[in-house]
Amino acid sequence: MKKQYQITAEGKKELEVELAELKSRRGEVADKIAEARDFGDLSENAEYDAAREEQGLLETRIAEIEDILNNATIIKSGARKSVGLGSRVELKTGNKTVSYTIVGPVEADPLEGRVSNESPIGVALVGKKVDEKVTITTPKGNTTYTITEIR
């Protein structure tokens, strides 16, 4: 059975843009390989080895993105009564307010405020409602937040 990936419409667009950019680099990498081949003995040719490694990484990422896109389910976002995939959640503790969007593991980027539903933060938030208190356990310790808004 194929793995299903849950991604947002925005995440799908980002992956499609990345895929197009990676595919456009194939010719550039092929040229590097051809140029490196002209340097002579391939067994001791660092440029050739580097170009082949770059090609391998490029093709691996292309295959990974194609697999994700071919097996993706789009997360529907919008107003909800409880936190779920695609929800934007506002949390407050003391005088500090933070905001997270709950996404699947493929799109997670904590620095951008997108946390996976499988992460400690995501697990603690999924299913909760506005005004509920949530204790999130992270490597820094436990922090208790109040959910102020779900979008």
Image (spheres, rainbow, N blue to C red):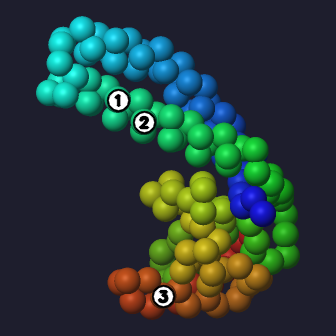
- Which quadrant of the figure has residue 119? bottom right
The kind of residue on which mark 2 rests is Gly
Q: Which residue is mark 2?
A: 56
Write the residue at 49% across / 21% down: 26
Q: Which mark is residue 52?
A: 1
Label 2: how many residues lie within 10 Å, few (<14), some (14-19) or many (20+)? few
* Residue at the spot of label 3: 137
Element class at badge 1: helix
In the rendered view, tell whether residue 56 sits above or below residue 2.
above
Q: Establish if 43 lies above or below 9.
A: above
| 77 left or right, relative to 108 | right
Q: Nearer the viewer, residue 27 or 135?
A: 27
Q: Position of residue 65 (x, y in %)?
A: 61, 42
- Residue under the image location 85 percent in, 76 percent down: 81
Comes first in the chain, label 3 or label 2 = 2
Q: Is residue 31 visible from the viewing direction of this image?
A: yes
**Residues at marks 2 and 1 touching, judged by CB atoms closer than 8 Å:** yes
Front of the two marks 3 and 1: 1
Crowd band around label 3 with a 10 angstrom C-alpha radius: few (<14), some (14–19), many (20+):
few
Residue depicted at x 48% and y 78%: 95
Task: Tell which of 75 and 40 is nearer to you.
Answer: 40
Residue 34: horizontal and vertical position, in percent?
34, 12
Q: Spatial distance from mark 3 to mark 1, Cα to Cα?
A: 43 Å
Look at 49% across and 84% down and name the residue there: 94
Q: Amino acid at mark 1?
A: Arg
**Mark 3 is on which residue type?**
Thr
Outermost residue toward the left in this view:
44
Quadrant of the frame with the N terminus: bottom right
Question: Which mark identifies residue 149?
Answer: none
Image coordinates of residue 49 in percent, x first then y, are 26, 30
